[in-house]
Each structure stands twice: as structure tokens, then as C-alpha cells.
Amino acid sequence: MPSLRHSYTVTVPEEPAAFPVDKPELRRKSSSLSRSMLVSTFVGLIINQAKNKSAQGLVGLRNLGNTCFMNSILQCLSNTPELRDYCLGNTHRTDLHSSRASRAALMEEFARLTRSLWTSANDAISPFDFKSQIQRYAPKFVGCNQQDAQEFLRFLLDGLHNEVNRVTVQPAASTEDLEHLSDEEKGRRMWNMYLQREDSKVVDLFVGQLKSSLTCTDCGFRSTVFDPFWDLSVPIAQKNSGGVTLKDCLRLFTKEDVLDGDERPTCNKCKARKKCTKTFSIQKFPQILVIHLKRFSDSNARASKLSTYVNFPLKELDLREFASESSERAVYNLYAVSNHSGSALGGHYTAYCKNPALGEWYSYNDSRVSPMSSSQVRSSNAYVLFYELVSSHSRYQTCRL
Ligand SMILES: [Zn+2]
């Protein structure tokens, strides 16, 4: 390995001539380039070293028998700049404690695979070794059955987090009474208590905090609960006319729900189980927001899939209306989509990702990677959306290079 003391930036290739790009993309090109040039020096070194056509994160993943669900998610994660840098720079090793290093096989294999996706000279590589590790961690992925990509993402992020959790000794659960605090302060304390137990690069990137407010319909008493979330699983709104937008789905997700019957919570004031109303809002926005469109239903034994076209923005998804605190600024840009085509009984997964080094969209279909227009990113196959925060306090403006 050569000396890493050189200062490097990623070489941004020229715009491919035959590549279809719509005009708003062109106008915004300068901003996406400036960000891609801020990729860390070490990553720049690695990418510059491999001077061949497939050395820019455009390497495909072979299908090992119904593994497209895994390939799709792996490509979305490979195009998540901070996670990629974490793997390419081997930063994850500093988070492994010697006592756990031998048990960190999943993170090692994930980092190795990500590195291959960014440096291999081949058009496609095999995720076999990685699959062996994820099977060891989550035996449900053994074999060649088609699996759910969103479920796989949850298992994978959870597994990676556990191996690089900076907390080695978890403190006893706090019994402190937070009920007298303001909602904002309570949310902040709950978040800090969470970080005392779960603190990793994966958490830094993917975890946000959801606020649930319960109001007793009998006495009017309102209580709040704060929970960390790894993704938002939003129901698909149904409309008779016009298109369904992502915001329609998020509004359906956050709209007031009535908890009655067996679901009745215990009201702290009535000291009894009472019918309550429940609303959700986002207390803390994650750096990477994963939105899972709930297309599949497995209720009543018959699996079914909704193929509703959901219109979602590629740029400037403003989620302020879903924030608990009105001051919170939450604007996101889309950078990856995991797609599912076919029915609930059988189908195929692909990924559309905006390559962070090139600033252009590519279609990742197992071993095939091909350029695509940003106007093709939206489809009724979109299943898991990956958005990155672009707020004013974004860490991109400070700690790179
Ligand atoms: Zn009550």
C-alpha cells in the first residue's frame, strides 16, 4: 500500500456524450460535482489507483440464485458515500475492539465487497463470501429463496451495527422519570440514552427518532414516546383520481390513528386501558433516510402486491411538515432506489443509484450495470427509497478533506 500522505481528489470524468440527461440535472451539475470532489482523500487514492472503466463503483454483482434482493440493496449501500468511505478507508477497523474483532466477520466481508465494487477491474463480482456471512448472522437467508429486500436491509444494518458498536459495556437502563420535561428535552434525553447503548457509524448515518403522541379520548391526557427508527415503512395512499405522491404516503403514515379494543394503551392519568388517538412525527431526522413503500401485504394468508405508481422527488424532498419541532430543517435528495418488478409470488429486484463519484444515475441489474436517465428513476417498481439529508447543518460542508 503506497503512502497515504498525498493529497488526492477524485478525478471527475467528462460527461459521457451519449448519456441522456435532462436539463434540470445539467443545471445542477455544478453542485453535485463539488460534493463528489469532496470525497475523502483516502477514497480518492483508491479510486485513482484503479484506472479502468469499471473502477468507479460500476461493478455488477452476480446472481447466486434468487439473490437479486441482496444485490439490489448492496448496490444502494455501495453508493452511500459515507458508508462506502467507511469501508474503503478501513475506518471500520478502528471501531472493532480486539475482544470482538474475531466476531466482526460480517463487517469485514461487507467492507471487502464494497471495496471490490469500487476497485475491481471485472464487470461483475460474486457476492458468495458475503452471502456466507449474512447467512451465518441471519440463518433465514440460507438457501436460494427469494427474500424481501427491505427485510434484508434491516438485518444487514443491524448486523453491521452490532459489530462496530462503539459501546462495549451497555449501561443499565435508566429509571429516571422524564415525564415532567418538555417534549423537546425528553426527546433529547431519550436520544442520548439510546446513544449510550447503540453508537456506531451505521447509527450515525441511518437512525432517526420518531415521536409518538398518545392522547386519551376519555380524560384528554397526552403522553409522548420517543423511539429510534432505521427506516420509515409507509403505507401506500390510494386515490381515485390523480397520482399518489410520496407525501400522500407520509401523510397517511403520520395521520391520527385510533387505538381501540385490544390495542388500547394504558392512560397514565386514568390508570386504565383507554381508547387513545396516536400521531407520529419525526423528532430527529437521520442523515440517510430510508423510506420503505409498503407494497406487500401478507395478511389473510394470500400475499399480494400494490403496484401503485408513487411520485417521489429526486431533489429537495422537504419533510418539514412531518417534523415535531417546526424549526427543524429537513430537505433530502434521492440517491438510490431498490426496485421490485413482478408479483408478490415472484419477481425481480434491481437498483437505480446515483453514482457519487460520477454524479449520474445507473441501473444495477445483478451483473449488468448501465447508464440511465434521471427521468427513468421513478417507476411503479420503486420499493425502497434512499434519501440523503442536504440541510444547512449538513456535515458535508465541514469535515471533509
Ligand atoms: Zn385518560
Image (cartoon, helix red, strand yellow):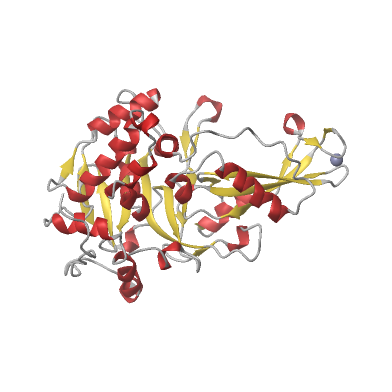
Residue at horizontal 88%, vertical 44%?
A: 219
Q: Quadrant of residue 200?
A: top left
**Image check: 322 left or right of 8?**
right
Residue at horizontal 84%, vertical 46%?
A: 221
**Image check: 21 left or right of 232?**
left
Q: Could you say where residue 56 lies in the image, as x and y percent from the top left? A: 21, 56
Locate ligand 1 by image quadrant: top right
Residue extending farthest to the bottom is 27
Q: Is residue 301 above or below residue 283?
A: above
Q: Could you say where residue 365 lies in the image, as x and y percent from the top left? A: 25, 45
Residue nearest the viewer, comparing 342 with 101: 101
Q: Could you say where residue 323 lies in the image, as x and y percent from the top left? A: 62, 58
Q: Could you say where residue 394 lies in the image, as x and y percent from the top left? A: 47, 64
Residue 68 makes an appearance in the image: no
Q: Is residue 82 above or below residue 92?
A: below
Q: Is residue 401 above or below residue 173?
A: below
Residue at horizontal 25%, vertical 56%?
A: 42
Residue at horizontal 37%, vertical 47%?
A: 338
Residue 70 makes an appearance in the image: yes
